[in-house]
Amino acid sequence: MGFPRGRHAARFGVAGLVNATGTGLFYPFALLFFHHQVTAPMVQIGACYTVATGLGVAGVTQTSRLVDRFGARNVLVTDTLIRAAVFAVYPFVHHLAAFVALATVVSLAERTDQVASQALVAGLVPDDERPGWFALSRMTLNAGMGGGALIGGLLLASSPGGGYHWLAWANAASFVIAAALYLPLRPVRAAAVQAAERTTGAWRDVLFLRIAVLSGLLYLVGLAVEVGLPVYLIQYLHEPTWTVSLVFAVNTGLIVLFQLPVTERTRRRPAMRMLACGTAGYALTFLVFLTTHRVEGTVLMVSLVMAVCLFTVGELVTSVTTMVIVNGLAPDDRRGSYIGVGQFFVGLGTTAAPLLFTVGLALSPDGLWLGLALLSAGIAAAVLRLRVPVAARLAAAATAVTSTAEPISDGPGAQRRARDSRR
């Protein structure tokens, strides 16, 4: 089934599942929670939430440097405990300014979490085992978010009007448990640092920046199903709301069931070629969406399920492959800052998605789906153009790591301990 090897794999997977379940409890009801807590119109709360998210995206390029300085495990544990503290005090927040400040902290912590968790995997396992660990994180994320949302909905239904604070406190508890599970995970891989890489930052690395931009665009395209499709189904096709639940149930179920085995079967194939194939799957999905307003009834449901299955296949391939490529291009001594730049572009895609898709649907649904299909095809073509230099860079990085045998521990003082061991 592709479950990753290593004595820490199960602990890493459980930590991710607990983390995601707590987030799933709260995230779908976040705007309702703050509307319940803060006496402000929903539109104003939504605007402030967007601002807080944008500030988190802008700040991740700075906080990601902490991963290189203090170690991925240390930053991940600290970051998780910070979010636990924020969610513990959320039920006591009743002012809009305090809400914006705390939401910004959470947004920044979430982005930093993505950086630190990927860097932690890179330090725990060899290059050829990373895809399985990234796939495990994707599987647990989807399973936890889906299960958490279901539990949160049941919790609110059982205590109408007074259950919101329990969602925040349950999320805080999940972060404390996750931090305890992350604590024993100490990276042991050697740091392969080449002289040429020491003087090159992520913003000057042209090849990496091209991949980072493409990954941000790819993430934007992928959000079309999550953000744009529900609006399209309900407001433009006038379908019942259960069709949205059907779409997400199919997508989540397929990811939970097949993320690990699909990654196991694709991880030894050329990464850039797999990324292009997955992106082509997105393009085909949008072409199917382009035909949905011309059919109805059973044919429409079959078309939707077929399109979502096709989209999920692309997602199964692209999500893990993108992480593998970004981590492979990042030098070991600056992995955090590199991944942080990648997360910056992913965050831009996340921030732009709601506005882009709502405006696109208002202007022309067909134009939106056709535009996304062409954008996906363009991303796939750009990926194929970069496959040779990226493959050469990944091979050089793998060779450098293989030639370095000294283990290091996470955090500051690692190089000093390595020198002492040589003496």
Image (cartoon, helix red, strand yellow):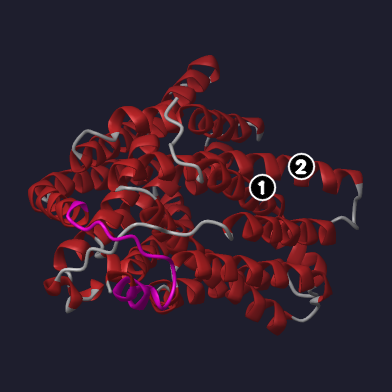
**Could you tell me how far apart the alpha carbons at marks 2 and 1 are, in whole angstroms?**
9 Å
Query: Label 1, on which residue?
Result: 21
Q: Give 177 or 88, whichever is nearer the viewer.
A: 177
Classify mark 2: helix, strand or loop.
helix
What count of labels does the image hold?
A: 2
The answer to whether 302 is drawn above or below residue 325 in the figure is above
User: Residue type at mark 2?
Assistant: Ile
Judged left or right of residue 105, residue 358 is: left
> What is the span of residues highlighted in magenta in the rendered image?
402-420
Crowding at mark 1 (Cα within 10 Å: few <14, some 14-19, many 20+): many
Assess whether mark 1 and mark 2 are in contact (beta carbons under 8 angstroms): yes
Amino acid type of disc 1?
Thr
Q: Nearer the viewer, residue 245 or 320?
A: 320
Q: In front: 383, or 20?
A: 20
> Where's the N terminus, which quadrant?
top left
- Return the x and y of residue 358 as percentages of the image width and height: 48, 54
- Residue 151's tag is 2
Q: Which mark is residue 103?
A: none
